[in-house]
Amino acid sequence: MAIASIQTAHDLDAPELALYRTLKRVEEHERAGVLVAANHKVIKRLLASRYTVDSALLTPEWLAKLEPALRARPENIAVYVADDALLETITGYKLHQGALAVAKIPPLPDLAELLKNSPRPLLLAAVEGLASAENLGAAVRNCAAFGAHVLIVGETCGSPFQRRAVASSMGTIFEQPVVRVANLAETLTDLRAQGVRCLAAHLDAQATPLARAELRGDCCLVFGAEGPGLTPKMLAACDERVVVPMPSHMNSLNVATAAAVFLYEATRQRA
């Protein structure tokens, strides 16, 4: 039995429920080394993963549906049950819909080790300057959908373990290999030295149209935030600039959308 206890929560003042009261304080969660999974679909993926689950806060309805998966876990999980009225007081009720869980953020894998153990040809993605947790989570989801071996998160991005990022990834963060690096430009330079072509997704009149870009070999697709795009430093660290051709009145794509288009084209070419 992997449920340590099932307790009824009459209010959210108990110290053990502090993390559920502070869903907007993502920095506190990261300092504590934990993430908060919100909504039952994400929690189901969490319970099927190797992540260590500390606790869950559920309505009686979600307890009934998730209890078999909770009991199948190897660790002891503290489960708190509260009615809808109490859970509605937590920020983002429409997002969590009465099901939340706290899990430990595991040590992130080493990039060199991941590359060593990944099949060839490599398909990597890297992101710079993504402040939006939703966009970062969607990028994680797209990498998982199209078989990217690793998503490299640069130093100017937010955390992929923020609640909104985890939710936007639909729990694929629990499966998709992700690494965070202290200097993305240096990482790209190192990849190029290992024979990995780094391709910048960049709107440029001189850029190669995506359909003509060579994506069948080892490559890393590099994306910046919508609006500012990639910085000159990051563009200089890449081998080539690649663009999705669009009508003249369109000047950008959402970064997660662009990542999906690029990754799909890479998998299409490799098929």
Image: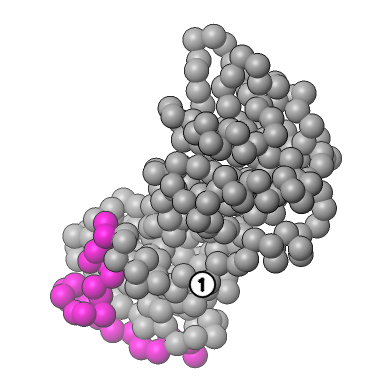
- Image quadrant where residue 30 sits: bottom left
Q: Quadrant of the C terminus?
A: top right
Q: Number of numbered discs present?
A: 1
Relative height, residue 140 to residue 257 (above, below): below
Q: Secondary structure at mark 1?
A: loop
Q: Which region of the structure is painted magenta?
A: 1-25
Question: Is residue 3 located in the magenta-colored stretch of the structure?
Answer: yes
Which residue: 31% across, 61% down?
A: 27
Q: Amino acid at mark 1?
A: Pro
Most foreground residue, 91 or 1:
91
Task: Please indicate whether residue 3 sits to the left or right of residue 264 in the image.
Answer: left
Most foreground residue, 205 or 183:
183
Task: Please indicate whether residue 123 sits to the left or right of residue 86 in the image.
Answer: right
Relative height, residue 233 to residue 14 (above, below): above
How far across and down, in percent of the image, does residue 71 sit? 50, 83
Q: Is residue 145 visible?
A: no
For mark 1, what is the residue?
A: 106
How far across and down, in percent of the image, does residue 19 sit? 28, 70
Counting other residues with Cα less than 10 Å from the Cα at mark 1, is it few (<14), some (14-19), or many (20 or more)?
Answer: few
How far across and down, in percent of the image, does residue 8 sit? 25, 81
How far across and down, in percent of the image, does residue 195 sit? 79, 46
Which residue: 44% across, 48% down?
A: 157
